[in-house]
Image (cartoon, rainbow, N blue to C red):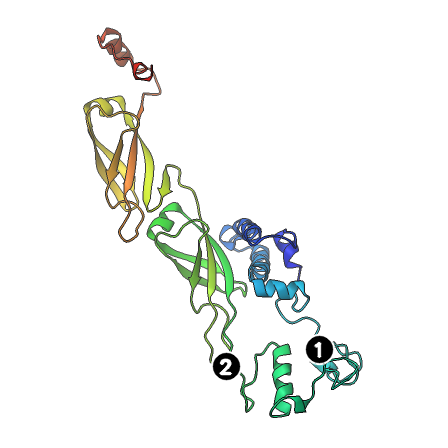
Amino acid sequence: MKDPYEVLGVAKTASEAEIKKAFRTLAKKHHPDKHQGDTAAQKKFQEISGAYDILSDAEKRAQYDAGAIGADGNPRGFDPRSGFRQGNPFGGGANPFGGRGGPGGFHFSFDDQPGGAAGFEDIFADLMGGGRRARGGARAATKGEDFSAAVTVSFDEAAIGGTRRVVLQNGEQIDVKIPAGVKDGQTVRVKGRGGAGRNGAANGDILLTVSVAPHPSKTRDGNDIRMDLPVSLKEAVLGGKVPVETLTGTVSLTVPPNANTGTTLRLKGKGIASSPPGDLYVRLVVVLPDKPDESLKDFLQGWQGNYDPRAKNR
């Protein structure tokens, strides 16, 4: 497998934030949702996720940098068949652990540990990545591996929640619930859907990084939503009812007479689906017709009003 630093395109000195940013950028680009049926894109996404799984975990990253594990996350350089042969991976002679005072310099013998041979089994099990054996030969329970994944959701999905299909490092596709109110860049933990636990231990989790696509007219402000709403000159002067698209459907908003650009109206409970729910703040923007309106032009030419909107700034 490729070097995870090379896969994510970051330096070995990259910070946690730089690694996360690189992962999110690549995950968006190569996510299988954008490349339906493209096995190469799915393989690339799995490679990216695998690299992030190592570099986002401080312990795994340190082990990789030290050469203890490979790019696949498994112990590096251990060959169980080399057992007691000369040139074993531990640098010793006939004894892979060097023996007491042996050439490997690792002073260990079965007599050093209570229970004799059980000491060797403990070390062997650790080196093989299988977890320690409990006294009596039974392996200790080991929690399953956590998986990393990424998904991009719409503004509305992030606000009210939803369900999205994600692809894991092992190629499995599962439907994941997107919680209402999730924020851009937030990591959602899906318990028990990661790698299988060993010897009765719990499964790992999925760490899902959520990106929220921008909305063309709405922005988030905490648990509130803000938006601009165009209104005609007639609606602004005389007032009236105008339709507003909310997260849960279209509602009728009452525009008061003599409203102006910048007038902000609140729709209670129409914001983010939180507890309590946020509000929707609608800022009115008075818009003139794209094409000249001769009747409006004639009216204004005969209008006797002398209002100067710049006077208050003098």
Q: Position of residue 50 (x, y in %)?
A: 58, 61
Image quarter in which the N terminus is found: bottom right
| Mark 1 or mark 2: whose residue is earlier in sequence | 1
Q: Residues within 10 Å of mark 2 (few under 14, many from 20)?
A: some
Left or right, 132 with reference to 112: left
Give the CA separation, mark 1 to mark 2. 24 Å
Left or right, 17 with reference to 276: right
Residue 66 seen anywhere in this rendered image of the structure: yes
**Label 2 near label 1: C-beta < 8 Å?**
no
At label 1, the amino acid type is Asp
Residue 59, by quadrant, is bottom right
Quick check: 8 above or below 241?
below
Quick check: 292 above or below 252?
above
Residue at disc 1, secondary structure? loop
> Mark 2 sits on what residue?
199
Report the front residue among 266 and 238.
266
Q: Please report the residue visible at 55 percent of the width from the left and 59 percent of the height from the top.
A: 56
> Mark 1 sits on what residue?
79
Residue 71 seen anywhere in this rendered image of the structure: no
Residue at disc 2, secondary structure? loop
